[in-house]
Image: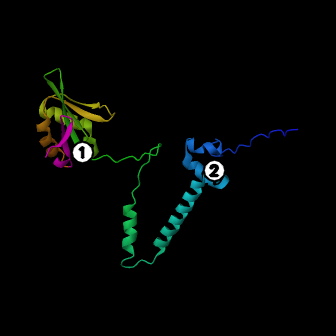
Amino acid sequence: MAEKPQPVRVLYCSVCTLPAEYCEFGPDFEKCKPWLINNAPELYPDLLKEANEKETGKVSEQLQSVRISGGDGAAPSGESSSSKQEVKRLPGGKIKKKEKQEVVIEKVVRNKRKCITMVKGLELFGIKLSDASKKLGKKFATGASVVKGPTDKEQIDVQGDIAYDIVDFITETWPDVPETAIYFIEDGKKVPAA
């Protein structure tokens, strides 16, 4: 007579409540890692290796920090702290890049003769866009407003073709914005204003 099949015992993660094999697809794999290393190391052997590497890295850092500080002993520890930069990682494992501080000026023609000058990136220099749009509107005697662009970032739309006059105004009004950080978009190419 054939043996009766036994039910399969499934190990569930106590952190995310998924089966241990599916923790990597769960909401937060990072929180599950310590539990998996302790309770299911055979499922994820890479985690065990990674944990051992982190421990050896921590031990070596502790040894370097305990080292007697002399004339040349302080320099390496200063270099290691400045060379390590925290990088933001998005959920998919992608690295979030820090935006360049630059102002982009683009002229858009609408209805054949009407022009709109779009100014993007002033907020990266700590400038309030509402105040900047008021100043631009008063200076050039046109309508200026803060609107959301196609990438959901706010930009200033100024009525009229003032693309080349606006560079001098920006550098005079806000000295924090260097002229080397201002670019035009002409024929789909980014061209420096300076």
75 up-or-down from 132: above or below: below
Residue 121: image quadrant is top left
Using residue 66 as the reference point, say whether residue 156 is left or right of it: left
* Labelled pair 2, 1 in contact (Cβ < 8 Å): no
Camera-nearest residue between 58 and 135: 58
Residue 173 position, x and y percent, is 16, 44
Camera-nearest residue between 136 and 18: 18
| Quarter of the image where the N terminus is located | top right
| Residue that mark 1 sits on | 102
Residue 161: image quadrant is top left
Amino acid on which disc 1 is placed: Glu
Give me the residue at 59% from left, 57% from top. 48
Amino acid on which disc 2 is placed: Leu
Report helix, strand or loop for mark 2: loop
Using residue 86 as the reference point, say whether residue 149 is left or right of it: left
Residue 157 position, x and y percent, is 22, 31
Using residue 67 as the reference point, say whether residue 32 is left or right of it: right
How far is the residue under mark 2 from the one under mark 1? 48 Å
Residue 66 position, x and y percent, is 48, 74
Using residue 152 as the reference point, say whether residue 136 is left or right of it: left
Q: Which mark is residue 146?
A: none
Give me the residue at 28% from left, 44% from top. 124
Pointer 2 local density, CA inside 10 Å: few below 14, some 14–19, many at least 20: few
| Residue that mark 2 sits on | 43
Which of the two discs, 2 and 1, sits closer to the camera? Answer: 2
Residue 96 magenta-highlighted: no
Range covered by the magenta-colored residues: 176-194
